[in-house]
Image (tube, grey):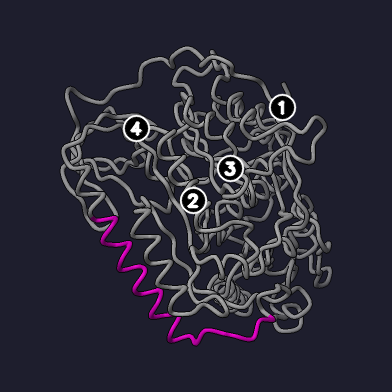
Amino acid sequence: MAADKPRPPREAASAGEPAAPHPAVHFHSLGCPKNQLDTEVMLGRLAVEGFTIAERLEDADAVVINTCAFIESAREESIQAILEMAEERRAGRLRALVVAGCLPQRYAGALARELPEVDAFVGTGTFPRIAEILRAALEGRGRGVYVEAGRTHLYDERDPRILLGAGHSAYVKIAEGCDRVCTFCAIPGIRGAFRSRRPESVLEEVRQLAALGVRELNLVAQDSTSFGKDLPGRPRLAALLRALDELELPEVPRGLPWIRILYLYPSAVTDELVEALAAGRRLLPYVDVPLQHASDRVLRAMRRGTTRARQERLVQKLRSAVPDLTLRTTVIVGFPGETDEDFDELLDFVRWARFDRLGVFRYSDEEGTAAAGLSEKVPREVARERFRRLVELQTGILEEKLRARVGHVEEVLVDRVGPAGAVARLRSQAPEVDGVTHVRRSDPGVRPGDLLRVRITGSRGVDLVAEVEGVGWREPPPLPPPHPGAARPGA
């Protein structure tokens, strides 16, 4: 998505007015929330260095495209965006074009040969140099490739950052990179080895974001469950979540009511982590745990370190321990060697589990991965048909689950307000991936970030429709006392 409504970075206010006009930069950010966060950090660095951030392309002197290279469709989207901006550069409507992120990190040499219109290629490890690189591009000091193999910048609480969107919801990256050996995944080769942020750094950034008015935090990493394994004392994810859950914010009148954790590796979900989620006050009853398949044979070929039986036990444990749990997962169809029997087992597992949210991906060969060398490729037309059947099955499950919510009174977080009402989300609706709730009421007093009690009245595709319950918009009651036994990270 393109950058919209950027907010001032935490350090930009003290940067002062530039002595001379500075060029305007427009960002186009593609891919996952982790990419969006990298974009926000680059935006913050440029603003501190005196650049102007342009919301519209037509107001920009330069464009930075932050790319994704995770799967084939993401690479195609990134290349298309580059080609469109390259035409703007050739036509003289842009003074500089910079391509950043996973695509140059992986394919910088080939891109530099094929795309002479691009002034600079910035890998994932050189984000902090974006201002210097952009200046060189604008001054015509030659084309540059700025890529460090096997390295990705892991920001911390000292990095300036501009939040995209309305500003009441934000992502916080708790770690970077991955040490898993899944045969289909190129992320370790792109993002490098796993590295955690210090718990104190995460807590300080959360305080800063809450002071800016953020009301929903979504914690992300390539593998959130490995948090702390590389730090002194080996603090665990459960301890970090408990610390965030009981974080005191007396200077923040509206509080920080929602915290969601994403990207849990299934074989690393411990009893301690489940207990922390079950006892949470701010922690939402939402678990995103990518399972990828259900056939033991395919799971072994993927090197997932688990079995269908273990995954079934995990689903049962989570649902029995965490009240009102929303369970999201992703699966891959068409993995090399996947037979009709393997796919039928996956269908049967999805029917049994009845996931609240399910992302379905068609396998694509990823350069440098073990699966790319497997010989038993599933024909594309077969993979497409399996994709269609699985999506059809999950669509029916989701429709049933959404209809079952009709009549319930629930809490929503308001994202946008218009003359006909508000666009909001339930606790079960993570940003961008789970649909929204359309609240049919107009009220001049409501604003993004408000919490509201609504009655669900219907569904519309993946979205819900609701009406305000009771009198007006409301703020939530104070948080209850901390749960017994809560501990700080490293305790």
The residue depicted at 34 percent of the width and 21 percent of the height is: 475
For disc 1, the marked residue is: 200
- The secondary element bearing badge 2 is classed as loop
Residue receiving disc 2: 4
Type of the residue with mark 2: Asp
The residue at 30%/44% (across/down) is 423
Q: Quadrant of residue 61?
A: bottom right
Mark 2 and mark 1 residues within 8 Å of each other at the beta carbon = no
The type of residue carrying mark 1 is Glu
Say whether disc 2 or disc 1 marks the residue closer to the N-terminus: 2
Task: Specify few, some or many for label 4: CA neighbours under 10 Å numbering under 14, 14-19, or 20 or more.
Answer: some
Taking the spot 64% from the left edge, 57% from the top edge, the residue there is 305
Residue count near mark 1 (Cα–Cα under 10 Å), binned few <14, some 14–19, many ≥20? some
Query: Three-letter amino acid code at disc 4?
Result: Arg
What predominant SS class does the magenta segment belong to?
A: helix
- Secondary element at image label 3: loop
- Which of the marked residues, 1 or 3, is nearer the chain's N terminus? 1
Residue position marked by numbered label 3 in the rendering: 269
Residue bearing the label numbered 4: 447
Kind of residue at badge 3: Val
Relative to 395, say whether 452 is above or below: above
In the foreground, 58 or 11? 11
Q: Secondary structure at mark 1?
A: helix
Q: Position of residue 299 (x, y in %)?
A: 57, 65
Whether residues under marks 4 and 2 lie with C-beta atoms below 8 angstroms apart, the answer is: no
Q: Nearer the viewer, mark 2 or mark 3?
A: 3
Say whether residue 463 is left or right of residue 375.
left
